[in-house]
Image (cartoon, rainbow, N blue to C red):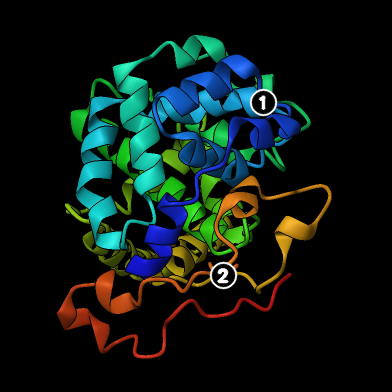
């Protein structure tokens, strides 16, 4: 895994290459100046923003919050450097927030469902990240809501690195988290709060979510909540959609994979569950190494 991460780091894209995908020269110059163009492209891929690359500013704003930076710095080192490009672009945004003016983050004054009407089926991740966090009066809920969104973005990025940025479980959880940010959706908020627990590392976060999802699956009679919980559990366990060359789809060209070295596999192996879950829990999932989902 370390060799793959090294290969990624040593083969950054050039501005001339990336410019062919409609990214403005000002944005490319900013990314190159801060040596974070690869992370920038990875976020565009993850959010399926190839037709709307300026919306990547929504992710940058989310990742540049001090609380988000703390989570990135705590979690990323345990994932073999695969998320280093994203950590770099987040720190660069804090150091030089002019990128938020060069891009077009979703407005916090209007709901993402209104701003992205007709496109939520594809832009579900950026819609989630663009949803205002309304829980300032409850610090514990406020922090958990942000942490859960960062967790999902991590999960989506890891899947993009492995060659697929289309996952029905990511879509389900992102949609529910967006709705949980809308005060008029109390049921969605309750679903999110039910998963809350201690999690200082990525491993502990996955462990917490699996445990609480299992508990709620037994307790709830809501088919909608069960769908959400199963999606959370599948992501926390590392389940992945079937391997397919999304980057070969003319409607979804993965920029990130266009610029990594030829020696890097299209689907980089995921860190085993033993590095995501505490040692005491690994034996419960002996064969869980990115199971293949049969639903295409």
Residue 50 lies in what quarter of the image? top right
Q: Identify the mark at residue 23; answer none if there is no mark.
A: 1
Specify whether 220 is left or right of 264: left
Residue at the spot 37% in from the left edge and 64% down from the top edge: 213
Q: Is residue 183 visible?
A: no
Specify whether 129 is left or right of 134: right
Secondary structure beneath label 1: loop
Give neighbour class at mark 2: few <14, some 14-19, many 20+ (Cα, 10 Å).
some
- Considering only vertical position in the picture, is 27 above or below 53? above
39, 160: nearer the viewer: 39
Residue at the spot 31% in from the left edge and 61% down from the top edge: 79
Residue at the spot 65% in from the left edge and 35% down from the top edge: 18
Estimate the x, y position of residue 245 in percent, counting from the top left: 72, 65
288, 110: nearer the viewer: 288
- Considering only vertical position in the picture, is 218 above or below 291? above
- Considering only vertical position in the picture, is 85 above or below 155? above
Estimate the x, y position of residue 96 in percent, counting from the top left: 35, 15
185, 279: nearer the viewer: 279
Give neighbour class at mark 1: few <14, some 14-19, many 20+ (Cα, 10 Å).
some
Specify whether 182 is left or right of 211: right
Estimate the x, y position of residue 87 in percent, counting from the top left: 33, 40
Image quadrant occupied by the C terminus: bottom right
Q: Identify the mark at residue 267; answer none if there is no mark.
A: 2
The mark that comes first in sequence, 2 or 1, is 1
- Considering only vertical position in the picture, is 257 above or below 36? below
In 3D space, how far apart are the residues under numbered discs 2 and 1 (Cα atoms)? 25 Å
Secondary structure beneath label 2: loop
260, 222: nearer the viewer: 260
Estimate the x, y position of residue 156 in percent, counting from the top left: 51, 53
């Amino acid at each position: 895994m370390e060799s793959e991460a090294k290969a990624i780091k040593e083969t950054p894209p050039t501005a001339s290459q990336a410019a062919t995908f409609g990214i403005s020269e000002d944005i490319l110059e900013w990314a190159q100046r801060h040596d974070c163009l690869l992370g920038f492209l990875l976020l565009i891929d993850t959010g399926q923003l190839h037709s709307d690359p300026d919306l990547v500013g929504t992710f940058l704003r989310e990742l540049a919050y001090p609380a988000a930076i703390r989570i990135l710095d705590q979690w990323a080192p345990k994932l073999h450097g695969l998320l280093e490009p994203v950590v770099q672009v987040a720190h660069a945004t804090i150091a030089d927030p002019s990128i938020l003016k060069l891009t077009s983050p979703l407005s916090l004054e209007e709901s993402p469902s209104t701003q992205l009407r007709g496109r939520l089926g594809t832009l579900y991740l950026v819609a989630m990240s663009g949803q205002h966090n309304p829980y300032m009066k409850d610090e514990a809920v406020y922090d958990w809501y942000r942490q859960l969104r960062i967790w999902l973005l991590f999960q989506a990025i890891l899947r993009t690195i492995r060659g697929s940025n289309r996952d029905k479980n990511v879509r389900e959880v992102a949609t529910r988290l967006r709705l949980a940010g809308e005060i008029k959706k109390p049921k969605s908020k309750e679903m999110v709060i039910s998963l809350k627990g201690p999690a200082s590392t990525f491993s502990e976060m996955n462990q917490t979510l699996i445990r609480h999802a299992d508990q709620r699956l037994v307790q709830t009679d809501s088919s909608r909540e069960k769908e959400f919980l199963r999606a959370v559990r599948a992501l926390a366990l590392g389940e992945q959609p079937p391997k397919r060359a999304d980057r070969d789809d003319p409607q979804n060209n993965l920029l990130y994979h266009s610029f990594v070295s030829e020696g890097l596999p299209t689907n980089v192996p995921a860190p085993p569950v033993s590095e995501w879950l505490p040692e005491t829990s690994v034996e419960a999932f002996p064969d869980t190494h990115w199971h293949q989902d049969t639903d295409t």
